[in-house]
Amino acid sequence: MTMHKKKLVAGNWKMNGTLAANEALVKALVGGLDSPACDVAVCVPAPYLSQVQSLAKDSAIALGAQDVSAHASGAFTGEQSAGMLQEFGVRYAIVGHSERRQYHGESDEAVSAKAAMALRHGITPIVCVGETLQQREAGQTDEVVKRQLAAVIHDNGHCISEIVVAYEPVWAIGTGKTATPEQAQAVHHLLRAQLHHAAGDHAAGIRILYGGSMNAANAAQLLAQPDIDGGLIGGASLKAPDFLQIIAAANQAMSAPRA
Ligand code: PGA
């Protein structure tokens, strides 16, 4: 039996939360997590980093940010540097989420500079790639995701083995339309080959998460795919029972015999 890679289940709270709601959510997660076999993280809005850092202290929940500046410091109003995030114990930073690409015009180059900055501060970037519905229908899925990942590979050289990739088809995000396990696996396989081409055997340890309407009901099937190493969960990460069920599905997938 081949070794299972440690799966990662990361919540992306997006712009949701209040002090009271976060406290209830994180307490329920900490209470319901029974030394999970998989890695678990929550990527929270920047103002709540400190709060969630204390709530999750000494638990299996790692702290994540939803973005990071490509710059080290200075006149960049509204941005947070990797150094600042590091001070709050941030372990992961999402970069290049489709909502940032779409609403903030982030280019592949900007995303790649952000990933580099995170890596320089010991923060694991969760690099998001994914096609729109229009691109999928035009048969451009492979080309789009490969281009998005290529930029990050190009700028990050051998550090690439330290990243996490998240395949998030834009048409599946927040829509309730999930990619089928076969559709997701096909893209994950393609990304895996691209990473292997760039980093050789070091690529074997890179986790490729699926994101886009992953929930308690469909997680097990998605996580059973050979190249799906975890999930980036939006909506379902705001409900403790659902998020815990996804974590349980990841634990289960890691203990299942490999086909
Ligand atoms: P969703 O979001 O699970 O609500 O579709 C996923 C994401 O955007 O990271």
Image (cartoon, rainbow, N blue to C red):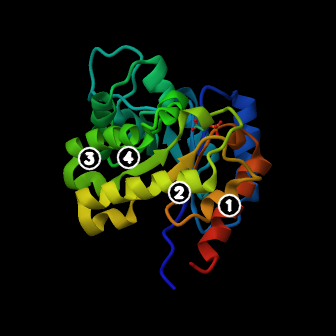
Q: Residue at x 59, y 59 (%)?
A: 60
Q: Earlier in the sequence, mark 1 or mark 3?
A: 3
Q: Secondary structure at mark 1?
A: helix
Is any atom of residue 61 visible in this view? no
Q: Secondary structure at mark 4?
A: loop
Q: Secondary structure at mark 3?
A: helix
Q: Residue at x 49, y 55 (%)?
A: 186
Is any atom of residue 179 visible in this view? yes
State the residue position of label 3. 153
Q: Amino acid at mark 1?
A: Gln
Q: Amino acid at mark 2?
A: Gln
Q: Give the distance between the C-alpha atoms of the residues marked 2 and 4, in whole angstroms.
A: 27 Å
- In the rendering, which numbered label is found on residue 185? 2
Q: Earlier in the sequence, mark 1 or mark 2?
A: 2
Q: Give the distance between the C-alpha atoms of the residues marked 3 and 4, in whole angstroms.
A: 17 Å
Q: Give the distance between the C-alpha atoms of the residues marked 3 and 2, in whole angstroms.
A: 21 Å
Q: Relative to 85, is 56 above or below?
A: below
User: Could you tell whether 15 is left or right of 89 in the image?
Assistant: right
In the image, 85 versus 229, the foreground residue is: 229
- In the rendering, which numbered label is found on residue 221? 1
User: Could you tell whether 42 is left or right of 112 in the image?
Assistant: right
Q: Amino acid at mark 4?
A: Ile
Q: Earlier in the sequence, mark 3 or mark 2?
A: 3
Which image quadrant shows ligand 1? top right
Q: Residue at x 47, y 51 (%)?
A: 187
Question: x, y percentage for residue 153?
Answer: 26, 46
Q: Give the quarter of the image for residue 12.
A: top right
Q: Give the distance between the C-alpha atoms of the residues marked 1 and 3, in whole angstroms.
A: 29 Å
State the residue position of label 4. 123
Q: Amino acid at mark 3?
A: Ile
Q: Give the distance between the C-alpha atoms of the residues marked 1 and 4, in whole angstroms.
A: 30 Å
Q: Relative to 3, is 126 above or below?
A: above
